[in-house]
Image (spheres, rainbow, N blue to C red):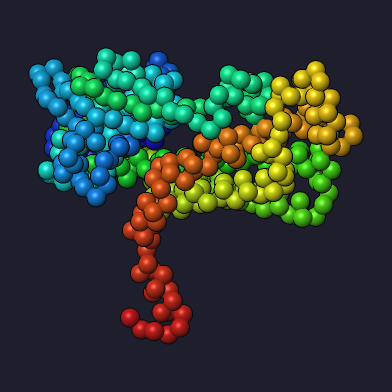
């Protein structure tokens, strides 16, 4: 969604300035995606090599995805995109530049879409905390027994892209615009963390009930605080959509200031929600014996005996909820709930920079002057 919306705007704007036909190509691709109900992954993040150097100044030019050569039928590209969530279960990969460019970086100012199984694209699957539990104990110890995720390093090893799939080609002056548009949509979309928060809050309430602490005032206070933080995230995301506007191409664009405020909250609030969940659940979150121990013919009865909580609640229920809290706060689920909340769509400083650029400080200063009698 973030990539498609951003490209619908930027390809139109490039065409208006340079008389190109990127938007026409893009709309044809969009129609193909919609008619076939395809899943697309937006590939923006490059390895970046030496972060103090611009793309064209890197010792290794492949640290940013770039043009290798141009042919009559298309272009050949080389490089890598990292941290690509869901890449191996996507049908199409849409590549974009990862930062603002200078004219000397123009060979890095490229955007295109390719089928995920295109020759020359290599996927290197990333490791996650507790990922072997998917095999060792998928029924209980994995925590979330229904869903998971993955991230990949996506390598483009001299990959051919036909012209009809190219949406930006050396228009370096539009690279920052594409990055900003994509980032705004992507930061707004981090309302997804409120959905995960709903699950974690529910699990925290259940473990309190299973352990007999749900009526304690300090436990209720912690859970209410979790709710307040969680609902703030979704509220900010909704507000930046509501305060959006229609671009000349017809696509609606979110409020950039509110989108960055929304994402900056997301870099903090899930960590506090997770901390409160662990506080309520207790140290058992990281000391729980395994499902094999629970099922063991000799020690299993002891595990069940000493992990029991409130009468009438099966010990297995308590174990399952604790495992889910572990999954979301330190295990497999923490990948997308915590670390992705911090670094996905840009780390906190990226949001702070955009907030500083977008806020109307003169309006605020003038309001203060007017109220206290300072004449401009």
Q: Nearer the viewer, residue 260 or 63?
A: 63
- Identify the residue at horizontal 67%, vertical 32% (top origin): 323
Whether residue 368 is situated above or below residue 181 in the rendered picture? below
Q: Quadrant of residue 8?
A: top left
Residue furthest out toward the right: 311
On the image, the x and y values in percent for residue 369 come to 41, 79
Q: Considering the image in quadrants, where does the N terminus appear? A: top left
Q: Nearer the viewer, residue 251 or 197?
A: 197
- Tell me, yes or no, if residue 254 can be seen here: no
| Image mark count | 0
- Identify the residue at horizontal 51%, vertical 36% (top origin): 336
Residue furthest out toward the front: 298
- Identify the residue at horizontal 81%, vertical 20% (top origin): 298
Q: Is residue 10 left or right of residue 151?
A: left
Q: Considering the image in quadrants, where does the C terminus appear? A: bottom left
Q: Is residue 230 left or right of residue 123?
A: right
Q: Is residue 375 left or right of residue 119?
A: right
On the image, the x and y values in percent for residue 201 come to 68, 42
- Tell me, yes or no, if residue 343 can be seen here: yes
Q: Is residue 167 left or right of residue 330?
A: left
Q: Quadrant of residue 198?
A: top right
On the image, the x and y values in percent for residue 165 come to 24, 22
On the image, the x and y values in percent for residue 311 come to 90, 34
Whether residue 69 is situated above or below residue 239 in the rendered picture? above
């Amino acid at each position: 969604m973030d990539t498609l919306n951003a490209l619908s705007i930027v390809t139109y704007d490039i065409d208006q300035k340079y008389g190109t036909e990127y938007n026409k190509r893009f709309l044809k691709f969009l129609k193909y995606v919609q008619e076939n109900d395809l899943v697309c992954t937006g590939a923006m993040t490059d390895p970046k090599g030496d972060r103090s150097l611009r793309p064209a100044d890197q010792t290794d030019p492949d640290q940013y995805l770039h043009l290798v050569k141009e042919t009559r039928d298309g272009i050949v590209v080389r490089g890598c995109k990292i941290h690509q969530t869901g890449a191996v279960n996507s049908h199409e990969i849409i590549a974009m530049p990862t930062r603002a460019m200078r004219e000397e970086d123009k060979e890095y100012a490229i955007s295109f879409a390719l089928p995920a199984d295109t020759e020359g694209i290599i996927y290197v699957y990333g490791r996650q905390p507790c990922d072997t539990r998917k095999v060792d104990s998928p029924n209980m110890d994995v925590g979330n027994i229904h869903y998971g995720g993955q991230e990949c390093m996506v390598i483009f090893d001299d990959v051919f892209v036909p012209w009809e799939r190219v949406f930006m080609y050396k228009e370096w002056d539009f690279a920052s615009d594409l990055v900003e548009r994509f980032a705004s949509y992507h930061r707004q979309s981090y309302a997804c963390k409120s959905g995960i928060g709903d699950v974690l809050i529910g699990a925290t309430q259940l473990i309190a009930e299973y352990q007999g602490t749900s009526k304690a005032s300090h436990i209720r206070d912690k859970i209410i605080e979790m709710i307040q933080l969680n609902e703030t995230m979704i509220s900010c995301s909704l507000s930046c959509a509501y305060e959006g506007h229609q671009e000349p191409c017809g696509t609606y664009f979110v409020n950039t200031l509110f989108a960055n405020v929304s994402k900056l909250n997301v870099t903090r609030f899930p960590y506090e929600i997770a901390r409160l969940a662990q506080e309520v659940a207790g140290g058992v979150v990281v000391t729980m014996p395994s499902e094999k121990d629970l099922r063991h013919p000799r020690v299993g009865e002891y595990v069940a005996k000493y992990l029991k909580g409130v009468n009438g609640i099966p010990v297995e229920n308590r174990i399952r909820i604790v495992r889910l809290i572990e999954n979301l706060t330190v295990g497999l689920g923490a990948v997308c709930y915590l670390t992705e909340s911090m670094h996905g769509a840009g780390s906190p400083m990226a949001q702070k920079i955009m907030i500083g650029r977008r806020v109307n400080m003169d309006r605020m200063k003038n309001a203060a002057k007017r109220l206290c009698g300072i004449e401009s």
